[in-house]
Amino acid sequence: MQGLHKYKFGKEEKLKSRKGIQLLFASGNKLNQFPFRCLWLRVPADEGVRLAVSVSSRNFKKAVHRNRIKRLMREAYRQHKSILFERKDSRGIAFVIIYTGTEMPVFSQVEKAVKTLLEKISGFINEPH
RNA sequence: ACUAUCAGCCGGCCAUCGCUCAUCGCAGGAUGGGAGGAAAGUCCGGACAGCAAAGGGCAACGCACCGGUUAACGGCCGGCGCCCCGGUUAGGGGUAGAGAAAGUGCCACAGAAAAUAACUACCCGAAAGGGUAAAGGUGAAAAUGUGAGGUAAGAGCUCACGGCUUAGGGUGGUAACACCGUUUGCGGGUAAACCUUGCGUGCUGUAAUGCCACGUAAAUCAACCUUGGAGGGCGGCCCGCUCAAGCUGGUAACAGCAGGUUGAAGGGUAGGCAGCAAGACCUCAACAGUAAUGUUGAGGCCAGAUAAAUGAUGGCCACUCUUUUUGAGUACAGAAUCCGGCUUAUGGCUGAUAGGUUUU
RNA sequence: GGCCCCGUAGCUCAACUGAAUAGAGCAUCUGACUACGGAUCAGAAGGUUUCAGGUUUGAAUCCUGACGGGGUCA
């Protein structure tokens, strides 16, 4: 099942609940990796791995630019999310990635940063102590 | 080739991977649809939904030449008036354009005086006093302009030609209005100052609203009230109307219990479905109309998410920049209930119409 | 998505019932005082009143439209 969905990023893997997002912002673990900031939290196993993506409208006033950045971030996560699935325990992860840079990125930059970010999270999860 | 207006299209194709919706399938999956002219600003107008539907008056807000168009509009189309440009002719452009002769206010500085005029001045007169507004000169604006008569000096005091204006008339036009002749008068500007007149307008908005699921609050405190009534409703206010919660004891004031309204503090949920995608819809053609627009016929189905889909990478082609390669880039910009407008942001290509210049 | 408010010197605010040089404090600069600096005193500079158009003789003020910033909702 997981192998089949290796490069997909469907509705079930997006963090959509307003309540979950508020919980994440209230008590999530913080992690900085320029140009991103990440908040993540362990959740029960039936939640699965869920991601939300965000760009501040203070840095990017045009909606078309925010959409562009969010699409690049989702695409990068889709290609490298298998890093997170090679984990030891079966609990789920909920996390949000926020773009904090002030300039329009290109895909290669986003891809590189997302990859290192996912490796960092994977390291925290697999070695909690 | 250039300028203006109108209409249309935005990079094209291929490969791999992916997102969202619908349909089919037990499932893996397959097929099909998937941003705009402005989706933007939220400046107007509606559809739709809820609340309320005895009224009357006032206030508030909006609009303001005429006719047409439309579901409606402050939009659009055509005309009229005014202003500007133009060998001041043809023509082109702009225009929030009712009323200043209903009333109130304001008009700095300068000036005699800024709106019931009189400083210098002119005339009569011995003076007291009276008559007058031409000349001075400031200002954005100075008491209807020019000429003649008239007079002591003057003055629409009178006359001629004008300007504006009141009333009623004739001709043309649906009308605004234009022209003609009669007549009343001479009142500076400002209504995007208050205001007056005419016409119109319920309020709140898809986070409306309905249903389902889950969950709690039943309680506490304060104030007021229980038919001589707190408070609620009828658009904001008033009148008026209407709804609205009581018993016991006591002569009464009041007390007790109960109830009602408002507020404080506090508690709970913030999930799902509908609304929500076939409509003042789109394309083409014909007809009516100067046009906006309308009618008829044929064909078509064209996003529907909810921390929010419509994308990424590679290759070739087209164009621009950079010194060739390399490289960078390809307008403005991303639906959120849906329509009709307005405003703003916008690079390029194609076509049509109009204009003048150059070449043949 | 709806509704509401505000833009004045580098900063914080006046002047908002139109009137001609837009004012005050802090900050900046110059000079004096001091051995130097601070404080103090004197003086100066700094403004397309967010932008564009209109009404008016005259606009920061009134009107319209843009641009920018902020707040609020079940």
Image (spheres, coloured by chain):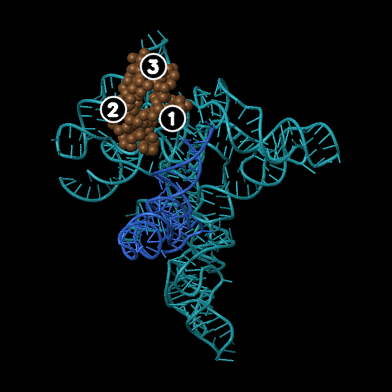
Chain colours: A brown, B cyan, C blue
Kind of residue indicated by mark 3: Asp
Residue shown at 40% from the left, 22% from the top: A93
* Image position of B124 with respect to C29: above or below: below
Point out the frontmost of discs 2 and 1: 1
Residue B269: image x %, image y %? 53, 26
Visible residue check, residue A76: no
Say which quadrant the C terminus of chain A sits in.
Answer: top left
Residue shown at 35% from the left, 34% from the top: A100
Q: CA distance from mark 3 to mark 2?
A: 26 Å
Residue A76: image x %, image y %? 32, 25
Q: Chain of mark 2?
A: A
Q: CA distance from mark 3 to mark 1?
A: 24 Å
Q: Are marks 3 and 2 on the same chain?
A: yes
Residue B115: image x %, image y %? 54, 68
According to the picture, the residue beneath numbered tag 3 turns out to be: A89
Q: Chain of mark 3?
A: A
Front residue of A69/B54: it is A69
Q: How many marks?
A: 3
Q: Earlier in the sequence, mark 3 or mark 2?
A: 3
Query: Which circle marks residue A112 in the picture?
Result: 2
Query: Which circle marks residue A127 in the picture?
Result: none
Quarter holding residue A87: top left
Q: Earlier in the sequence, mark 2 or mark 1?
A: 1
Residue B232: image x %, image y %? 65, 38
